[in-house]
Image: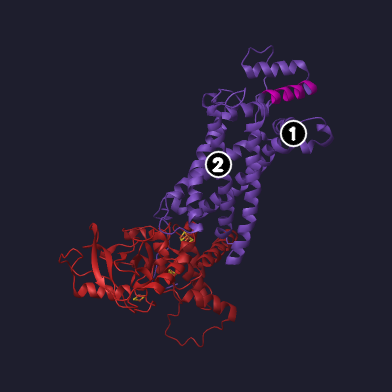
Amino acid sequence: MSLPQAHQSTLAWRQANRAKAVPGRTIVMTVRRCEGPGKLGWFESFKIPVEPNENVISCLQKIAANPVTADGKETTPVVWDSGCLEEVCGACTMVINGTVRQSCSCLIDEYAPEEGDEITLEPMSKFPVIRDLWVDRARLFNSLKRVRGWVPIDSTAALGPGPKEDQATQSTRYAISECMSCGCCLEACPQFLLEGDEDAWDSAFIGAHAIAQARLFNLHGTGKNLAPERLDELMGPGGVADCGNAQNCVKVCPKGVPLTESIGAMGRGVTMHAVTRFFKGK
Amino acid sequence: MGLAGAKTVSDRQSFFERHSFLLRRLHSLSGIVPIGVFLIAHLTTNSSLAWGRFALRGEGEGMSIAQGGVKYFQEEVSYINEQVPHLLLIEVTLWVSIAFHAILGVYYATTGKGNTAHYPHMDNWRYSLQRISGYLGIAFIFYHVATLRWGWTWLVPGGTQWSHHFSASTLAAAIQGSPEGWTALGVAVALLYFAGITLLVFHFANGLWTAAITWGLTVSVPAQKRWGLVCFGLGAGLMLAAWSSLGAAFMVDPQEARATEAEMILHEHGPEELQRIENKLEGRPPADEHANAGGEG
Ligand code: SF4
Ligand code: SF4
Ligand code: FES
């Protein structure tokens, strides 16, 4: 690799690479393989001839079509997850050159501009691997259940028009609503660690995305009916106080969700909630 | 709400989990009050060893900067040891708070796993440094208190004891390695102090910054930045106070300081009292002993 891994994702570095990308080159894609949950992983490299503007997924498709490693060994096709291919579903999230991001929007020209340059793909480390680059993000969705990340409108009767929303709240909420549950913020968080035991999910750190979603729905005219429950959950073990303010989450979020502001806002929320509860007696 | 969804978190957890919110907030609070407040008082008091001469004004006429510092520092220490009420209560509160903050802090630190190798952002470094400075800070505070307050002289290179009657000279002897001045081990102790106080001041300033997010005082990014500047300023000020205290303790001549302090006791309490205190410090049999064994850490 031409640079220490950690620096490879900086914007300036990527732009410079894109400008100098050599047409008709062959790159090396090194993939962390894993045959199934709990199995040990190993690395395999593939030589891939690339065209301009190719992305990681299209290279993975080439590997699937011809699963032969760089040293000529036949192997199984690499498994990965993807959906939208335009960075809105979050399914293709993986660790590329040591840093988490979506693979569909990851351009080869930006990461491996010269002949023989290498790109390393690894599955996210904070979720159980299903196979190769495909992970099980169930805990991420469990966190959304923990904070009741929805608007409670269960009813058989017509509820009439929804509540009005002012412009300021709307713009705060819009930014948070862009979250695509990709898991980048969790992968980069030093407080969010792999937890294979499902029973522990409800008391392990809930993660920045869910804290932000709690704020999104607490700010909603009808959603705020569940605000006390959300705040109770965020006060509990693994709640907002488990955040260590490393602020990695906000730096890796591909959607620019105001995660650290939401953490501050929900910190305020639970402080107020605790004081109110203390004097009200629940 | 009759909605399917998450279970309410309650009765299936450890003590830490059941009271997680209260414990987290007490941990945060204890770092500010009383520990942080004490740190500010402690460092400003100590730094008087460096700037005391200027605070003495007319009283310090004809004194060198070092001598004036020793005199002013001794006055402060005497004030704390002889006039501050409920000193023992204050001390016990501090011990309990520091132990609480340290034990919980170590427990909390084990719930995370630093990743600066992959995400080398400044904030992420702060995160890791906060934990490292916590661990090392505990070790340093223990050494500091054990040697200078509890009298574990076998941990002091020169084997000397700290005395609040001879505050500057005995401090200098402990940090320089001997009552005669610098020794190699003394330099090592001074370096240990330098690392310890620097890490702890960082820990406090950074903790103050993150506490504002935890409690929900600073929500927006500009607010976090502004509060960051305030914490940086406070940290820089305390850092100066800490370094100047240490610098002064390392530069002061222990023997000259001892003379200044002896003169102060002589002037205030007379020769018998001076004799008694000196006997006690040197471990000589006391002439008549109505010991006053107070001290300040
Ligand atoms: S700010 Fe909190 S949630 Fe975000 S990465 Fe840091 S510890 Fe994790
Ligand atoms: S907050 Fe951002 S990084 Fe986290 S899951 Fe949502 S989109 Fe992904
Ligand atoms: S496939 Fe949907 S974000 Fe990449």
x and y percentages locating residue B133 in the rendered image: 51, 45
Amino acid at pointer 2 = Ile
Task: Assign the magenta stretch its main secondary structure.
Answer: helix
Stretch in magenta: B255-267
Question: For the residues tagged 1 and 2, is the chain the same?
Answer: yes
CA separation in Å, label 1 and label 2: 34 Å
Q: Residue at x 48, y 69 (%)?
A: A212
Q: Quadrant of residue A141?
A: bottom left
Amino acid at pointer 1 = Ile
Is B77 left, or right, of A6 in this rendering? right
Is B271 left, or right, of A69 in this rendering? right
Could you say whether the residue bearing mark 2 is in a helix, strand or loop? helix
The residue lying toward the viewer, choosing from A159 and B240, is B240
Residue that mark 1 sits on: B65
Chain A is which colour? red
Could you say whether the residue bearing mark 1 is in a helix, strand or loop? helix
Chain of the residue under the numbered disc 2 shown in the image: B
The quadrant where ligand 2 appears is bottom left
The single residue placed furthest to the right in the displayed view is B58
| Circle 1 or circle 2, nearest the eye | 1
Chain B is which colour? purple
The residue lying toward the viewer, choosing from B284 and B48, is B48
Residue that mark 2 sits on: B98
Residue B175 visible at all? yes
Please say if B64 is above or below B99. Answer: above
Quadrant for the N terminus of chain B, please.
bottom left
Chain of the residue under the numbered disc 1 shown in the image: B
Residue B168 part of the magenta-drawn span: no
Q: Are marks 1 and 2 in contact (CB under 8 Å)?
A: no
